[in-house]
């Protein structure tokens, strides 16, 4: 069996000449003097180096190397990195140009299409976050790591998970459309998870209800009369604005000289449907200030029981 000889080029690029010395044990195509030399394999972008196959690609203008045990593995890695092994070609168009053209012509992904309000919201989200984040980066260079970086940037702004998902939604739709149109091989934002913000230590979620002092300060600025009674009713009952606006005299329950709203389980107002109280993130129900917090108001309060008592006219 003929000895394997070193394939390192010791000539010039125009007049190559192989080294020809016997290869050293543990290497693929190099002698002792050329263990660290990049030796072409015949496959573009794939080289011998010592005992490994090396792929060389470019990502965001930088050279990227990866090392593999076999030529087959190197070819797969090379194809995945450049998209040459996939059916869909990759586009080099700048993200900012592509995004603005996309949002102007996007038709939505359902039969209902895309209304103009949603298109405007998508354009605003892209201009505010995604376009400044990516700039003129080629569309093909957008990967999962860069999408995760955008999510982290949004979270650092103090946005809630729902807001982060709202701002990322147009980017996800854009990349999905790019895959469908053959401009990308895969959507790097597919199945992107946006988790709740981590709590600091053992601190519970910040309560958003006003304190009694804050509530008293707000009510003090409201003129006496109908408006004052309206806000005191909201504060004293925890009812929704729409519920209070829809109240009639018959909706009040006489409770030993004080008027009480029936619980949400029994409904408020004619034709209203039963509703449920909304729990907070800590698992307990929102506690609404009672009438004594409303500056001694005699505004109605919410009954803690389902009211099945007869309603009387005020």
Image: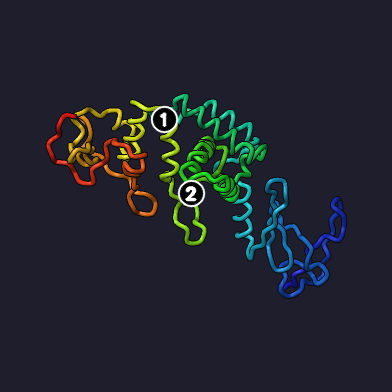
Residue 169 drawn at (x, y percent): 49, 39
* Residue count near mark 2 (Cα–Cα under 10 Å), binned few <14, some 14–19, many ≥20: some
* Residue pictured at 31% horizontal, 31% vertical: 242
Label count reads: 2
- Judging depth in this view, the residue of 14 and 92 nearest the camera is 92
Residue 300 drawn at (x, y percent): 26, 36
The answer, for residue 75, to whether it is visible in the render is yes
Colouring: rainbow
Residue 96 drawn at (x, y percent): 63, 34
The quadrant the C terminus occupies is: top left
Residue 222 numbered tag: 1
The quadrant the N terminus occupies is: bottom right
* Residue pictured at 28% horizontal, 36% vertical: 298
* Residue pictured at 30% horizontal, 28% vertical: 245
- Judging depth in this view, the residue of 135 and 55 nearest the camera is 135
Answer with left or right where residue 250 lies relative to residue 76. Answer: left
Residue 194 numbered tag: 2
Determine which quarter of the picture holds residue 293. top left
In the structure shown, which secondary structural element does the residue marked by tag 1 occupy?
A: loop
The answer, for residue 86, to whether it is visible in the render is no
Determine which quarter of the picture holds residue 9. bottom right
Q: Which of marks 1 and 2 is in front?
A: 1
From this view, report whether residue 97 is shown above or below residue 288. Answer: above
- Judging depth in this view, the residue of 148 and 281 nearest the camera is 281
* Residue pictured at 70% horizontal, 49% vertical: 58
* Residue count near mark 1 (Cα–Cα under 10 Å), binned few <14, some 14–19, many ≥20: some
Answer with left or right where residue 89 lies relative to residue 252. Answer: right
As measured in the structure, the alpha-carbon distance from the residue carrying label 1 to the one carrying label 2 is 41 Å
Residue 230 numbered tag: none
**Extreme left residue here?**
310
Answer with left or right where residue 71 lies relative to residue 163. Answer: right
In the structure shown, which secondary structural element does the residue marked by tag 2 occupy?
A: loop
């Amino acid at each position: 069996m003929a000895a394997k000889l070193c394939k390192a080029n010791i000539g010039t690029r125009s007049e190559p000449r192989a080294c020809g010395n016997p290869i050293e044990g543990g290497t693929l195509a190099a002698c002792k003097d050329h263990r660290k030399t990049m030796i072409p394999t015949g496959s573009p972008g794939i080289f011998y180096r010592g005992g490994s196959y090396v792929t060389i690609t470019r990502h965001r203008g930088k050279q990227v190397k990866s090392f593999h045990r076999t030529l087959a593995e190197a070819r797969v890695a090379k194809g995945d990195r450049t998209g040459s092994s996939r059916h869909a070609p990759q586009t080099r168009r700048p993200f900012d140009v592509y995004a603005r053209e996309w949002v102007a012509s996007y038709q939505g992904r359902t039969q209902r299409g895309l209304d103009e309000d949603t298109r405007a919201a998508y354009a605003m989200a892209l201009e505010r976050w995604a376009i400044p984040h990516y700039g003129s980066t080629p569309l093909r260079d957008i990967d999962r790591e860069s999408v995760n970086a955008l999510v982290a940037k949004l979270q650092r702004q103090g946005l809630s998970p729902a807001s982060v998902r709202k701002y990322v939604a147009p980017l996800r739709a854009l990349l999905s459309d790019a895959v469908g149109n053959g401009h990308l091989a895969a959507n790097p934002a597919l199945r992107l998870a946006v988790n709740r913000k981590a709590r600091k230590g053992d601190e519970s979620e910040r309560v958003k209800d006003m304190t009694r002092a804050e509530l008293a300060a707000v009510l003090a600025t409201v003129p006496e009369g109908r408006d004052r009674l309206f806000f005191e009713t909201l504060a004293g009952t925890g009812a929704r604005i729409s519920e209070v606006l829809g109240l009639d005299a018959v909706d009040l329950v006489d409770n030993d000289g004080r008027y009480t709203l029936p619980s949400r389980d029994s409904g408020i107002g004619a034709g209203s449907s039963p509703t449920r109280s909304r729990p907070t993130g800590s698992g307990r129900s929102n506690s609404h200030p009672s009438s004594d917090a409303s500056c001694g108001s005699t505004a109605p309060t919410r009954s803690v029981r389902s009211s099945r008592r007869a309603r009387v006219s005020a």
